[in-house]
Image: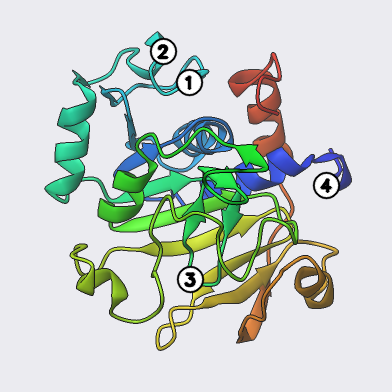
């Protein structure tokens, strides 16, 4: 199975799933994060405990949930809690990773899922936060998964729905968020970023096969630092693609 046949959603899911190796508790949103969690549990992290916004904890993910509150997010789980209970668990610090998407992201990992344009007269009205603010505020590591487009990677988000590092080092702590939490990686269909420790700005650390740093820069609406050594992400393997297509999402709901 050739790597060229892997679609953008498959590449995102495979890259994100590899980051869940050894994961314990993971807050999962709808779409690609579900694909990634199911793939990770199937191949890399069988003890992974998925946590869903509406209270499902520890689902086996044998059947892919279509939303964070549907019955498969509870299927054969270890607990059926409520939304307040799982958010309280995150407040207590027992949810390690959170996977989020967004319509816009800025250099500090702040996310917008509320409006494009002015709040009172928007160009596009988006779904809003849901539990994303809690996830981005409270999980130890937030992994952001997005399609890489210049209109999405902007110098400043039109509306701050979920905090990243706000305006730089120390800003999360000054806002009252737990020290040591925050964005960990940004995974796109072109590259992977971390956050440079001294500035907390998004930093390029890996490129997908066939992608150049110049192309990433052309699709990013702000300058970004580049790691001294930029890695090259591996292509999705035949086993990963087969697991995604035949076992996890055979009806191609999210693929």
The reply to whether discs 1 and 2 touch (Cβ–Cβ < 8 Å) is yes
The vertical placement of 150 against 118, above or below, is below
Q: CA distance from mark 2 to mark 3?
A: 33 Å
* Disc 3 target residue: 108
The vertical placement of 203 against 24, above or below, is below
In the displayed orientation, state which residue is furthest to the left.
92
The vertical placement of 247 against 217, above or below, is above
Marks 1 and 4: which is nearer the front?
1
**Viewed as shown, does residue 64 lie left or right of 48?**
right
Point out residue 45 in the picture as x, y percentages from the top left corner. Answer: 41, 41
* Disc 2 target residue: 70
Residue drawn at (48%, 71%), measured in percent from left and top?
A: 108
Residue drawn at (41%, 23%), measured in percent from left and top?
A: 68
In the displayed orientation, state which residue is furthest to the top.
71
* Disc 4 target residue: 3
**Viewed as shown, does residue 68 lie left or right of 157?**
left
Q: Which mark is residue 67?
A: 1
Disc tally is 4
Q: Which mark is residue 107?
A: none
Q: Which of pointers 3 and 4 lies earlier in the amino acid sequence? A: 4
Q: Nearer the viewer, residue 161 or 203?
A: 161
């Amino acid at each position: 199975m050739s790597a060229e046949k892997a679609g953008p959603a498959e590449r995102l899911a495979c890259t994100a799933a590899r980051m869940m190796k050894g994961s314990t508790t993971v807050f999962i949103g709808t779409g690609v994060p579900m694909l990634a969690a199911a793939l990770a549990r199937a191949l890399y992290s069988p003890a992974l405990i998925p946590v869903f916004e509406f209270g499902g904890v520890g689902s086996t993910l044998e059947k892919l949930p279509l939303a964070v509150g549907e019955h498969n997010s509870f299927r054969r789980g270890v607990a059926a809690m409520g939304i307040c209970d799982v958010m309280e668990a995150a407040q207590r610090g027992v949810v390690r990773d959170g996977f989020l998407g967004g319509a816009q992201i800025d250099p500090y990992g702040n996310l917008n899922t509320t409006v494009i344009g002015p709040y009172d007269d928007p160009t596009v009205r988006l779904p809003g936060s849901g539990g994303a603010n809690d996830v981005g505020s409270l999980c130890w590591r937030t992994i952001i998964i997005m399609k890489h487009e210049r209109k999405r990677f902007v110098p400043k988000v039109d509306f701050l729905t979920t905090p990243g590092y706000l305006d730089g080092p120390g800003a999360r702590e000054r806002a009252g968020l737990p020290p040591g939490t925050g964005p960990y990686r940004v995974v796109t269909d072109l590259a992977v970023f971390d956050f440079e420790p001294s500035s907390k700005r998004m930093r390029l650390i890996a490129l997908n096969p066939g992608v150049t740093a110049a192309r990433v820069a052309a699709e990013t609406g702000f300058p970004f630092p580049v790691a001294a050594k930029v890695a090259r992400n591996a292509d999705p393997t035949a086993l990963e693609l087969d697991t995604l297509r035949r076992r996890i999402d055979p009806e191609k709901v999210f693929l």
